Amino acid sequence: MKPNLLLAAILLIMVSMSACKPKEEKAPVIPMENFFRDPEKASFRISPNGQMIIFRAPHMGRMNVFVQKLGDTVSIPVTHETERSIYDAFWESDDRIIFTKDLGGDENTHVLSVKPDGTGLVDHTPFEKVRSEVVDILEDRPEELLIQNNKRNAEIFDVYLLNTATGVLKMIAENPGNITGWITDHDGKIRAAVTADGVNTSLLYRETEKDKFKTVITTSFKETLSPMLFTFDNKNLYCLSNLGRDKTAVVEFDPKTAK
């Protein structure tokens, strides 16, 4: 084929392919607020008697706590925050809901409670410049729960037993200075803890609350062994781990043998 004819054939093929190519459409621009707006509903939890649920949803411009009876289509807000959204909410019992919030964005969260009808609002940790958080809801002790706060030392968190009926706080675990997380068993006993120095992380364990914590295993920043909860016989721990693998998996870890 002559060069001119070859060139013409190539151009004809290119034009034909271009004509057959579907027109490209630009993807729609997603508004920035869509990445940060509140969900319609979140954090569903069922009451101990199985008759009600709570969830967080927008109300008065913030995420507040709603209560709804199972089988019903109507829900009522039991909190009415306008400055900051509620962080989380839990059933302490059928008659009381625990929730956490800060004041005006200072991130010093308080632990509060309210009845399912929206009455009886109580701030159980009305301390200034103190951050309080829920450690464990004690399902078999409906007027008690475990919380942690940094009231004693602003840099570390101790664990307290809170009686929501009397308001009494009793320290049950004093932080020696390096514990960054506490893990309770299914009886509400603090049996494990985590320490971190910015590079290495250690898992501590004790058989009973009368025993001293002992280091079970230390991992570097390249490794993960993150305890989530005790197995239901209170012997081993369910953890997230990438030890011996290239991806993180849920594993059962024996704190006595470190296997």
Image (tube, grey):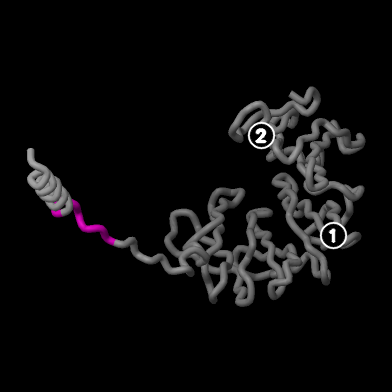
Q: Which residues are magenta?
A: 19-25
Residue 24 colored in magenta in the image: yes
Left/right placement of residue 235 relative to residue 21 reads right
Left or right: residue 172 compared with residue 243: right
Relative height, residue 108 to residue 237 (above, below): below
Q: Is residue 90 magenta?
A: no
Q: Quadrant of residue 25?
A: bottom left
Tell me the kind of residue under disc 1: Asn
Q: On the rendered image, what quadrant is the N terminus found in?
A: top left
**Mark 1 — residue?**
150
On the image, the x and y values in percent for residue 77 come to 55, 69
Q: Main secondary structure of the magenta part?
A: loop
Q: Position of residue 229 (x, y in %)?
A: 69, 38
Residue 117 lies, in percent from the top left, at 59, 67
Residue 241's label in the rendered image is 2
Say which element carries label 1.
loop
Residue at point 14%, 52% (across, down) = 15
Q: Which is nearer the eye, 194 or 132?
A: 194
Q: Nearer the viewer, residue 123 or 177?
A: 177
Q: Residue at x 56, y 55 (%)?
A: 43
The three-letter code of the residue at mark 2 reads Ser
